[in-house]
Image (cartoon, grey):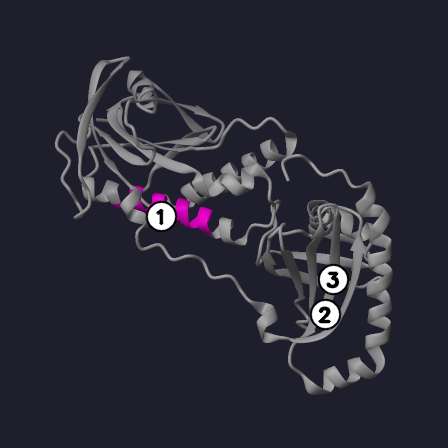
Amino acid sequence: MENRGLLFIPDISGFSRFVNAVEIEHSRFIIQQLLEVLLRANDSGLQISEIEGDAILFYKFGAPAELPALYNQVAKMFRAFHQCLMTYDHRKICQCTACLSAVDLTLKVITHYGEFTPMSVQHFEKLFGKDVIVAHQLLKNDIPQHEYWLVTHDLHRQPAELTQWMQWQTSSKETERGDIRFSYTQLGPLMIDFLIPSIPQELAKTTHMLSVSRDYDVEIKTLCYTVLHFEFRPLWYVGIQTIDEVEHFLPGIGSHHRYVLANGTTARMSISSFVYDPEGKTIFSETNAKDQSSLCFVAEKTGDQTSRLTLELYFQPNMLRQVVFHRWGKKKQAQEFRLSLERLDPVVKAMVVPLEF
């Protein structure tokens, strides 16, 4: 059996073919993150042959794996995949089509047993053989659902129903090796007991210290786009020279970044809350890791082509600090807010918002 073994292919689908650069870039990053999740969920000794776009070709030489062990591996990958998507959906900030539709991505898993030969290419084992072709051909089939586990009869002829909800159906496909019979079962029930990730509500625990607002002659989406993107912040916010060490390519609630300030100091920040409502208020806050003060940006629609931005400052409950701020710091901070909002005006008026936002 040295040239016989398991072929295991988790395959992601659901993204449309995007045409603009932002959506293509973001969809590529999301797929990359999900592939990494699938790789980390591999706890059954599967070897990686190659990553094939939206899929991973795993293999393992030896006798056919027991069905319960295979199910545990499939279930772990499926759960990790959807937990990642749900977490991202609840913490995302970007409003492009790729990021909004990521939660609708699906996963199917093809498992087949057959004969194949490896060839070493750098750090990977490139697989050759008709059964490798068969496994890939099975990705295209007549199964009407999008999320399922497919088991060829070469692997298990009569798969057992391992859970109360598991129901196997049979079908076949004409392949390189002729007509291949297989069984498949839906994976959707694995999501029944999923918990929606909690989102930290930092501002609810803090004390409001200051608010300064300004109106703009731009629509709300333009204002939100300008305020939410870190690369534009140094153009208008007083004292920020640059923002670097952004933890994620697509920042979300809980991710970290660093302010490099004009006075030579730095401030480690985390995104602590985000609510997007272009017809009402969009709220975005960042919390300073050192002193736990929070800067909140509140953008609201005031008309079809007008909007308002409010900068708000919050402190952790501390009576002494609050008294000191009101007596010696509030006036200076208010001036900084007003100047920042004033500097934002030409920036937001010149901003060109991508169609996908």
Q: Which mark is residue 310?
A: 3
- The image quadrant where one finds the C terminus is top right
Left or right: residue 182 compared with residue 284: left
Type of the residue with mark 3: Thr
Residue stretch rendered in magenta on the structure: 72-86
Task: Tell me, yes or no, whether the highlighted magenta stretch contains residue 79.
Answer: yes
Residue located at (83% from left, 50% from top) = 235
Q: Residue furthest front?
A: 303
Left or right: residue 144 compared with residue 220: left
- Chain-order first, disc 1 or disc 2: 1
Left or right: residue 309 compared with residue 317: right
**Residue 132 quadrant:** top left
Residue identified by numbered label 1: 79
For the residues marked 3 and 2, what is the alpha-carbon distance in whole angstroms? Answer: 10 Å
Determine whether the residue tagged by mark 3 lies in a helix, strand or loop.
Answer: strand
Type of the residue with mark 1: Arg
Determine whether the residue tagged by mark 2 lies in a helix, strand or loop.
Answer: strand
In the rendered structure, are the residues bearing label 1 and label 3 in contact, judged by CB atoms less than 8 Å apart? no
Residue located at (42% from left, 46% from top) = 40
Crowding near pointer 2: few (<14 within 10 Å), some, many (20+)? many
Q: Where's residue 210, x and y in %?
A: 75, 72
Residue identified by numbered label 2: 313
Q: Which mark is residue 180?
A: none
- Chain-order first, disc 1 or disc 3: 1
In front of the other: label 1 or label 3? 3
Q: Where's residue 85, x and y in %?
A: 46, 46
Type of the residue with mark 2: Leu
**Residue 131 quadrant:** top left
In the rendered structure, are the residues bearing label 3 and label 2 in contact, judged by CB atoms less than 8 Å apart? no
